[in-house]
Image (cartoon, rainbow, N blue to C red):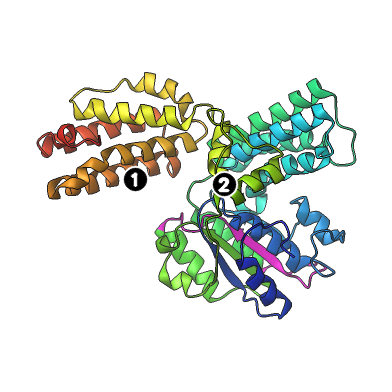
Amino acid sequence: MFDNIISQNSTELLCDDILKNRLPGSILFHGPAASGKFSCALETARVLSCEKKGDWTCTCSNCLKHKALVSQNVLITGPGNKILEINAAKNSLLVMNIQNSRHLEASRYLFIRAVRKLTSRFSPVLWEGEDKLAKFSPLLESINDNLELIQPGRVLPDDSDLRKIVDEIVKDCEKLESSFLYDSLPLSQIRNFSSWAHLTSGSSNNGKKIIIIENADQMMDASKNALLKILEEPPKDTMFILTTTQKGAMLPTILSRLRTYSFVERTIAQQQELIQRVFHTTGNINGEPCKTINEFLQTYLPITPDAIYGQAESFFNKIAEGRIPDIPALVTACNGFEPRIVFKIFIQGIIDVQKGLMKTGPGAETSAALIKILHEAWNSVTVFNLNPASVLEELTRSIMQLNFLNNGILRYQKSE
């Protein structure tokens, strides 16, 4: 069990709890980003449904469905940036196909799973009653039609045709993620998966249903309260698996109903081994192998993190000096802030550059107010899906007003 979850001792405890039938109905995987929490959630769902012993090599019907991420007994929800992983998996597939490598089938499987980690969040069960369902359905249909062309067991097209197919899949995935995926789990989806969980299942694993909520800390108060109610009165034969990087952001009352399994930050050597093992490459930044998984994935951004940080620093400094940034030029330089993670890096860049404010009492107060403004800007883009350009214009006004009310403090206390 859990052979594909590398360098995480928590899987030993998890395995022991499963074998001794001590696993509760609601669990939480907590730890830093890229530590294997979501992969472990998927693997837990597979193990619990396995008709045999839960080995990774098992070929029972349930395991095959779980490995392909097509099991009808699993719902995956919650926000998550998947497009970088999809692009990395695409590159691996194309390279292995050109080289006719022994890793070709593993890369094919990796790409299909990466895509379905995203598309699984668009199950009609979760989106029932939503206007968006009709809007994104053509995208899902296009993605699934193209995935069918590269399914295991089929002869892959030649290099040029394969590239066309996977490029179209990635293009549709980018639109699906940026235009339709919520960055905060909505109340409607909690109500929908609650109704689904109460329905009787005809599955071969004793009716067990599994709901995976990634980034479970990212939800509004109404959603948190609705989830708490479900966890207080869980549906029969339903397993809840939550993941989070910010355990402290979750309600204590929710945490009290979850058994927590902690994931740790892998060493640089372990992360480099994982990159090589999964993607069959080391990645490259300035001629050096990538040191972390996040660093590796960010090499697939349309603009480098350093360039994004540079734009954030320029934006902040111009406002600090009383000048208005050129928002259209900024948006263009940041690729329209697509994928959405570009905006997150940009906001983090502003947070980093203003740390010099923390050197004095008045500066610390201004910093706290500024971070609140930045948080509101982030929510405007990710939760309320507002246009980044209009959000940046409002952000400019808010920061300029904050600076004015604090006697131009930003100009004199920027980070060195």
Residue position marked by numbered label 2 in the rendering: 130
Considering only order in the chain, which callout, 2 or 1, is on the residue closer to the N terminus?
A: 2
Q: Amino acid at mark 1?
A: His
- Residue 256 visible here: yes
> Looking at the image, which residue is at 57% across and 41% down?
132
Q: Pick whichever, 271 or 219, lies toward us.
A: 271
Q: Pick whichever, 248 or 133, lies toward us.
A: 248
Q: Is residue 203 magenta?
A: yes
In the rendered image, the residue lying farthest to the left is 407
Q: Secondary structure at mark 2?
A: loop
Q: From mark 1 to mark 2, how far is it between C-alphas?
A: 27 Å
Percent position (x, y) of residue 409?
A: 14, 37
Asked if marks 1 and 2 touch (Cβ < 8 Å), the reply is: no
Q: Secondary structure at mark 1?
A: helix
> Looking at the image, which residue is at 15% across and 34% down?
412
Q: Pick whichever, 290 or 406, lies toward us.
A: 290
Q: Amino acid at mark 2?
A: Glu
Question: What is the magenta range?
Answer: 198-220
Percent position (x, y) of residue 335?
A: 48, 24
> Looking at the image, which residue is at 55% across and 47% down?
80
* Quarter of the image that includes the C terminus: top left
Q: Relative to 129, say whether 139 is above or below.
A: above
- Residue 128 visible here: no
Q: Which mark is residue 375?
A: 1
> Looking at the image, which residue is at 16% across and 45% down?
363
- Quick check: 361 left or right of 236? left
For disc 1, the neighbor class at 10 Å (few under 14, some 14 to 19, many from 20) is few
Q: Choose top left, top right, bottom left or bottom right for residue 189.
A: bottom right
Give the overall secondary structure of the magenta segment. loop
